[in-house]
Amino acid sequence: MKALSRSSSTASPARRARVAERATEGAQTLAPDMAGFRLLKLTNLMSRPFFGQFARQHALTLNEWRSIVVLSSRPGSAAQDVSAATGLHPMNISRAVIALRKRGLVEEARDPDNHRRMLLWLTRAGEDLFASIAPHSEAQNRRLFDVLSAEELASFTRTLEKLTARAEEITRDE
């Protein structure tokens, strides 16, 4: 298999021609400077401290942590609700919940209004784990956003809400 070129100067003439053609047609080439890619980078950078410190210390995956965060603020949620809140695929949430249940961090009970749904709560151990990690996550969040004015943060939040709604619409249609 041929290795991908690292720069346009080492790309084949045919590749350079395709990139130039797309640029003249106004099409945006998939690249790290695209807004969506930059959002992924921001998410990855913000997740690094979790992997560096908490994942190993608590034998916790990022999807398990995200599930704990949702259940801490929305006790009695179903796995589908956790999936909707995080944007993660339902199968990833299902795996996370199974692991958390096995470790005694989450408990479940049938929804009295819909016996097919299982509702989830953090156990005391799950609440304690959340309480030990959350202050670090909250401090990191404050450090990230303290560079923005209140007006910039409000504008950014509105933009995120708009983009999230659009992404949910797109994924519903697929």
Image (cartoon, grey):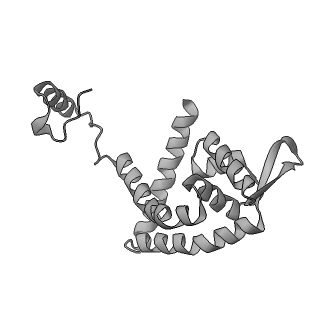
Residue 15 position in % (x across, y down): 17, 28
Q: Residue at x 44, y 67 (%)?
A: 153
Q: Nearer the viewer, residue 78 or 99?
A: 99
Relative to residue 65, is residue 53 drawn left or right? left
> Tag count in the figure?
0
Q: Nearer the viewer, residue 76 or 168?
A: 76
Q: Residue at x 57, y 55 (%)?
A: 61
Residue at the extreme top: 14
Relative to residue 97, is residue 160 drawn left or right? left
Rendered position, 55 above or below 30: below
Residue 113 position in % (x across, y down): 88, 46
Q: Residue at x 44, y 56 (%)?
A: 43
Q: Quadrant of the N terminus?
A: top left
Q: Nearer the viewer, residue 173 or 56?
A: 56
Rendered position, 51 above or below 79: below
Q: Residue at x 14, y 24 (%)?
A: 14
Rendered position, 35 above or below 158: above
Residue 62 position in % (x across, y down): 55, 55
Relative to residue 28, is residue 112 drawn left or right? right
- Displayed quadrant of residue 124: bottom right
Q: Quadrant of the C terminus?
A: top right
Rendered position, 75 above or below 109: below
Residue 98 position in % (x across, y down): 71, 48
